[in-house]
Image: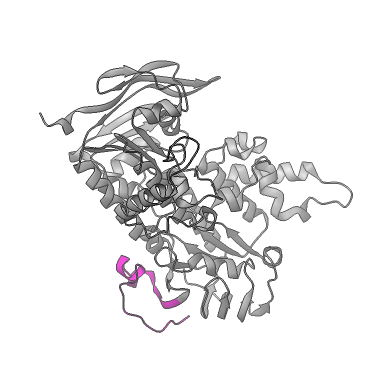
Amino acid sequence: MDARDGIAWELRGIRKTFGPIVANDNVSLVLRHGQIHGLVGENGSGKSTLIKTLCGAHRPDSGAILREGVPVHVDNPFIARSLGIATVFQEFSLVPHLTVAENIHLGRWPGPFFSLGWRSMRDAATRVLDSLNIAISPDAVVRDLSAAEQQLVEIAKAMATNANVIILDEPTTALGAREADHLHGLLKRMRDAGTAILYISHRLDEVVRLVDVVTVMRNGRVVGVAGETSLDLSAIITLMIGREVHEHYLKTHTEPGEALLEARDIATDRGVRGVSLTLRRGEVLGLGGVLGSGRTEIARALFGADPLTRGEILLRGKPIHLRSPGDAIAAGIALLTENRKTDGLFFNFNGTENISVANFKDIDRGFWLDLRRERAASREFIGKLQVTPEAEAQLVDRLSGGNQQKLLVARWLYTGADVFIFDEPTQGIDVGTKVAIYRLIDEITAAGNGVLLISSEDRELLAMSDRVAVVRRGQIVRIAKASELSKADLLGNAELGTAAA
């Protein structure tokens, strides 16, 4: 038998509890050499606990972990790394003020005792980056990189350890389609070389295309394992959420109304170059393009986060001057940011406070705050969006990614905004929450409001948008009905045309 067909790692009957909560209940998983194994499930299904157990961040209450058929004790992350386990978590573990080369070699810096081999470190980092086709300088400081570039550095850091198993938790969350395809090509080459890979992702389409085997979890248990002959997307979704989803992308196409938000030849110092667009009432206007094309920079300009160097913005037909995001909020513009961790949530606040923070005037009574009104509004939106009830009084860092995203949506609904800018709204959340977000977008437009949608998931963007503006190098090169565009158009393969709002 080919060595690649053998079992590299195995988890048997893993049980892990946190007080009364059973996170993993008799979970078993087999990782084989030369195989990409997918692990899927909704937020709270137990996936994160399981991979943290394998990489030494958690110790199981019972069960066994075997390496090449031999039981081992993975008591901490250092032991896990020494045994050949490399993990790329969804949350970055980079040191912002260090260079890319230094981050890649954290914990294993080359050189003799009490000194560092700077040249060796840089050369080794260059080789890793080149092998992954990552065009980032090893001398770049991490804090100066975009979220997508930092994700690539995380992956390079894991690949540099020569591990026998690679665990990737939502590795394409911050990547565009081309970057994700690059990564998938690399993973396939690693698989063919005999590496065992555990791949966790909420992007089920890419899971079905990439993995050889997929394990589905729900409520802390394994509810199904599908092999190469039965990787059916609808069946996997049904296993994940316990019911059939007949319509993944919920979209009601309505006739758009009058112009709601207009940008006329706007530009900023952050790369927006002469952008003109019109968002109408009842419309979803998508912004398509590759990673780094300028979509987020356009959103920041429309939200007052970056000052205009030329052009003007009109809201309901009247020019507005946005000197800050506060001006945009007061005008009725909401921005759901791409990175909810760093730009959206307040982790020292509970769910109620995270909802009310953008509409403080509703509870401000001069010398005191109407906390009863705040709690009532919070409960209303928590119930409407089906957020876990614990979110009302719980710090948001203890909530799942899906619940965190819903709280951000609740915040902007509470402001009574007319214009909603959604930058990657389904990034890193499970399929059930995605469907809830799609339904909410439909409700927002049905009420006569407008949605500007940015998404790196091409199928999502085309399915949920009425029109799509294709962005390239900070400019809109084409605006067309979503039904007239293809994935190739979004990636910039279409001929340049004249944009028409």
Residue 268 percent coordinates (x, y): 58, 75
Q: Is 196 placed above or below 459 here?
A: above
- Residue 100 sits inside the magenta stretch: no
Q: Is 182 placed above or below 108 here?
A: below
Give the quarter of the image for residue 14.
top left
Name the side, left or right, on which 2 lies relative to 220: left
Residue most toward the top?
A: 62
Q: Is 357 placed above or below 6 here?
A: below
Please name the residue shown 47% across and 34% down the image.
44
Give the quarter of the image for residue 335.
bottom right
Please name the residue shown 49% across and 20% down the image.
17
Residue 143 percent coordinates (x, y): 54, 54
Camera-side residue of 138 and 248 = 138
Residue most toward the left?
A: 1
The segment highlighted magenta reads 476-501
Q: Is 294 placed above or below 132 here?
A: below
Residue 196 percent coordinates (x, y): 27, 35
Name the side, left or right, on which 260 lies relative to 362: left
Check the image and tell me how it is coloured: one colour
- Residue 490 sits inside the magenta stretch: yes
Name the side, left or right, on which 486 lies relative to 474: left
Camera-side residue of 25 and 184 = 184
Residue 10 percent coordinates (x, y): 29, 24
Camera-side residue of 80 and 316 = 80
Q: Which quarter shows the N terminus?
A: top left
